[in-house]
Amino acid sequence: MAEEGANTAEEEALNPTVAEPPLVQLTRLSPVAVTSVWPTEPHHFTPWLLASSDLLSEVLGIEVDLEAREHKVGKFSLDLIGREVTTGTRVIVENQFGSTDHTHLGQLLTYAGGTEPSTVVWIAEYFRDEHRAALDWLNENTNEDVRFFGVRLAAVTMKGAPAGLIAPFLELVVQPNDYVKGAAVADSAAGNARAQLYGQFWSTVGPLLKARGWTIGTGTTQNWWSMSSGVSGVTWSISYAMFGCRSEIYFEHPDAAVNLARWRVLADRRDELQDAFGEGELLFDDLPNNKGCRIETRLLGPKIGDQSNWGTVRDWMISTQERLRAAVAAVGGIPSVVSAAVEADASSMA
């Protein structure tokens, strides 16, 4: 009997006759008119994207922090301006509904000339072949430090989904040729021994940062690695400095008053922050001669050239970042103070 039962089970496995109920119900995505989600590009989509840097970061594959909209470039206004978190370099974004056109291509180049960005992003619903070719040409023929991206915008829902359940859809349609651009950057870095050392060091730190969900960025050949905080104009950062190493929260909003206000909220609770942080002194520096402010802790002594200390430095950076982030969370999190101008603009849109 046992042998017969075994044979039956084996046959059923090879020739199943009874199907199990499906574990999922498959459906299809259905397009939704972009204007039904964002009635206008300047007053609805652009403010939404300003608050959605994380979505754009996922599409581009680099961590960006969008900081402001309607940024003045001479007599014109750029849709969005921000920076790449890891390197601190400038990012600009030009949006449009409908198909790409020569007017917006010209505007994109005008804004690039007036802001000197490292990352240029053009977002549209449809990309004409000639405009894709134009971005490809720019990627192949401009300075290796500048990258041009084309991103298609759409909105989708699922067939059978409740009314109003809509998701944004951003698709990368043009990107730099990483081999061509990367090779030039690598050649440049090869002549700089210090840059090579930073690149090697951060390559050992990067996986630890990504494993904790702190960044999606790639390594840098600079002395610092900045990470998004989720609040525009505020970053977490680890770095080498003249005195050794630094681990910090840095306030770098374009409005210096916003930075100072956010910093003061935490500085007023410095005793609580220090207790929550634990070992190591927290330094509260409002940087009176600069636009930004910081709260940091320091490790005195290490230099990038001393590779025997890299393990100690790496452990210290991870530990202090974990404790600093936990300490800030314990006192209420990063203050979301914004400028009066931003508040007034938001009120006018409500």
Image (cartoon, rainbow, N blue to C red):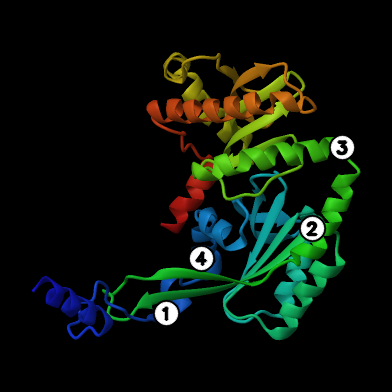
Image marks 3 and 2: residues in contact by CB distance under 8 Å: no
Q: Amino acid at mark 4?
A: Phe
Instruction: Tell me which corner region of the image, top left, top right, bottom left or bottom right, holds residue 86.
Output: top right
Q: CA distance from mark 2 to mark 1?
A: 38 Å
Rendered location of residue 110, percent (x, y): 79, 64
Whether residue 20 is visible here, answered yes or no, is no
Image marks 4 and 2: residues in contact by CB distance under 8 Å: no
The residue located at (58%, 80%) in the rendering is 98
Residue assigned mark 4: 45
Q: Residues within 10 Å of mark 1 (few under 14, many from 20)?
A: some
Q: CA distance from mark 3 to mark 4?
A: 45 Å
- Of badges 3 and 4, the one in the foreground is 3
Q: CA distance from mark 3 to mark 2?
A: 18 Å
Q: Amino acid at mark 1?
A: Val
Rendered location of residue 94, percent (x, y): 65, 65
Residue assigned mark 2: 182
Q: Along the polypeptide, which appears first: circle 3 or circle 2? A: 2
Residue assigned mark 1: 32
Q: Is residue 76 above or below residue 232?
A: below
Q: Along the polypeptide, which appears first: circle 3 or circle 4? A: 4
Q: Along the polypeptide, which appears first: circle 2 or circle 1? A: 1
Q: Check residue 193 in the rendering and tell me which mark sits there, or answer none.
A: 3
Left or right, 222 with reference to 246:
right
